[in-house]
């Protein structure tokens, strides 16, 4: 289960428990009942176990492969990954769920942006990212 799916499941559990409490004790007592419920503590504990926002584990496998292929052989990345490499946040958001990815993949791409950027900064040489010229120059570099 991905982090997004876990968060959605935890949020749904919380909403279901809140509705159950409202049904049992009415609107007035629902807030106190829900905040003291065991399910709230479980949700908080589960969220605390999720990887840090910049953990490399948060990078979707397809995006990680694109980054690795780009760094190693100058392979042309998708529009989303290229926009991130070029530092163009607006374009990255626009292409996060483009034809290369499903809607769910697009959401995961957006949620993993901090991890993607951290990975780029830590793993790639600064000369091959940061602007359109750097990215184009790296892809056009003769390999041999």
Image: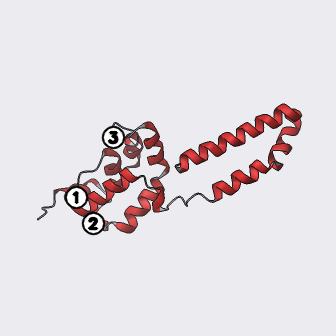
Q: Circle 2 sits on which residue?
A: 127
Q: Give the residue at the far front of this rendering.
A: 1
Query: Cα distance, mark 2 to mark 3?
Result: 26 Å
Label 3 crowd bin: few (<14), some (14–19), many (20+), radius 10 Å: few
Residues 18 and 112: in front is 18
Element marked by disc 2 = helix
Are discs 1 and 3 less than 8 Å apart at CB? no
Query: Cα distance, mark 2 to mark 1?
Result: 12 Å
Residue 87, visible in the rendered structure = no
Picture quadrant of residue 52: bottom right
Q: Circle 1 sits on which residue?
A: 74
Element marked by disc 1 = loop
Residues 110 and 51: in front is 51
Query: Cα distance, mark 1 to mark 3?
Result: 19 Å
Element marked by disc 3 = loop
| Spot occupied by residue 90 in the image (x, y as percentages of width and height) | 40, 44
| Spot occupied by residue 28 in the image (x, y as percentages of width and height) | 88, 36
Q: Circle 3 sits on which residue?
A: 100
């Amino acid at each position: 289960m991905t982090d997004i799916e876990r968060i959605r499941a935890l949020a749904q559990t919380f909403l279901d428990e809140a509705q159950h409490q409202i049904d049992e004790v009415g609107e007035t007592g629902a807030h106190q009942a829900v905040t003291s419920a065991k399910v709230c503590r479980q949700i908080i504990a589960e969220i605390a176990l999720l990887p840090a926002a910049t953990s490399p584990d948060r990078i979707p496998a397809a995006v990680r492969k694109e980054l690795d292929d780009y760094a190693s052989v100058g392979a042309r990345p998708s529009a989303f990954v290229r926009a991130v490499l070029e530092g163009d946040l607006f374009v990255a958001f626009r292409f996060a769920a483009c034809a290369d990815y499903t809607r769910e993949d697009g959401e995961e791409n957006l949620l993993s942006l901090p991890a993607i950027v951290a990975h780029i900064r830590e793993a790639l040489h600064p000369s091959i990212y940061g602007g359109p010229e750097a990215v184009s120059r790296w892809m056009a570099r003769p390999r041999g």
